[in-house]
Amino acid sequence: MPIFAGEILTANKLELYLAKPVIQLRRRTNQSIPNNTITAIQWNEQVLIDTMFYSHSTGTNPDRIVPLLPGRYWVEFTVHYAANATGDRRAYVGVNGSALAPVHRSINLSNAASTTRMGRIVECDGSSTTITALTLQSSGSSLDVVGASGIADTFQSFFSMHYIGPSF
């Protein structure tokens, strides 16, 4: 949303140009992730949300964030897996249901909990673009993404988006 020469800058437009809206979600309970299947994390708690700029529901499509302001966003998430010594863990940013490259991949070499993270810039249209945090694990069977009951818990799975600015 660039400002053009001759454009009338109202208070509402100025607020949109200067706003740096953010959303942060997290898992409060464990979520089972099937073996070798890209799966969207279901975010069941809104830690912080600027509702004028983002749409998210913990009841309907809790895997999705819909940014309501067109532009560029920084998307970042961390997935905390239960202990398992087999296979790898992957993290992808999803846009409109498709996993984008690159992927973050970690190999689990010991029977310990593991974390995988991903971050990237995405462009959103401000009305229909959906953003998801996707993960895949190859432990040989289902494996839990660990939820956290309290905000101060050490190991948490979380998902956040930050508005960077307009697309040019």
Image: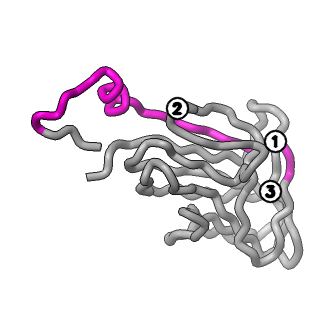
Locate residue 153: give its quadrant. top right
**Label drawn at residue 52:** 2
Mark 1 lies on residue = 28
Mark 1–mark 2 distance (CA, rounded to whole Å) = 24 Å
Locate residue 93: give its quadrant. bottom right
Nearer the observer, 83 or 158: 158
Q: Residue 13: percent from the left, percent from the top?
A: 31, 29
Density class for disc 2 (Cα within 10 Å; few <14, some 14-19, many ≥20) is few
Q: Residue 107: percent from the left, percent from the top?
A: 69, 71
Magenta segment, which residues? 5-30
Of tags 3 and 2, which is closer to the observer?
A: 2
Callout 1 amino acid: Arg
Mark 1–mark 3 distance (CA, rounded to whole Å) = 10 Å
- Height in image: 65 above or below 82? above
Locate residue 6: give its quadrant. top left
Can you name the residue that lies furthest to the right here? 141
Callout 3 amino acid: Val
Secondary structure under the numbered disc 3 in the rendered image: strand
Can you name the residue that lies furthest to the left here? 5
Asked whether residue 155 is in view, the answer is no
